[in-house]
Image: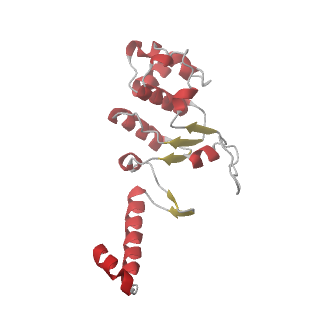
Amino acid sequence: TTLTKILDRKIDFNKGERISGHNNIISYYSQDVADSLNPEFDLIETLDSVGTEKTIGQLRSLLGAFLFTGDDVFKKVGVLSGGEKSRLALAKILLSPSNFIILDEPTNHLDYSSKKVLQQALVNFSGSLILVSHDVEFLKPIANRVVDIRSGKIKIYEGDIEYYLYKRNEETEQISQVKVEQPIEASSRKEQKRIE
């Protein structure tokens, strides 16, 4: 979450450098996205505010894909549940003219059908995407590069999420093997036997 906020210039950082790509148009989806929606707008007005040239029919179609049907599209944002607000914010991002989308835990509050709609939209997205998620099944068809940030170090895995999980497991086994092969001091023999 902190990294995504730094990338979107929501928060500053202590040292290092942030360099945006040429002509990047960033859309950012945060876990607290509901706070940024205007509670007085209805769903159609919310999507129309993105400034696109979409017709009401096209906006209703997009809302339908995110499970807003019939008169639901005329509900005020203020009466929506947390999950409904999340779905609306995701629809708004997909409608924006961005070529770089940053999503921080976008599947929180989404049901199975909504996840599938979002997943397909992201698979079809032609721009760049940074996606922070713990939902492995959601990531499988989307991710083609995984950046692992752990203990102040970055490691890049050029492959999908299954490749990443395979390599992480392999690395963990290698580290465990090295620890077992190291000589054991007399004081830690009991601890080593417990671990084994």
Determine if residue 184 is in view.
no
Image position, residue 120 (x, y; %):
41, 39
Nearer to us in this view, 101 or 75: 75
Image position, residue 10 (x, y; %):
65, 40
Callout count: 0
Give the residue at x 55% y 27%. 35
In the figure, 171 relative to 23: above or below? below
In the figure, 174 relative to 105: above or below? below
Nearer to us in this view, 83 or 55: 83
Determine if residue 47 is in view.
yes
Image position, residue 170 (x, y; %):
38, 70
Residue 12 left/right relative to 82: right
Give the residue at x 54% y 22%. 47
In the figure, 108 relative to 168: above or below? above
Q: Residue furthest front?
A: 187
Viewport quadrant of the C terminus: bottom left
Colour setting: secondary structure
Give the residue at x 43% y 25%. 84
Image position, residue 15 (x, y; %):
71, 56
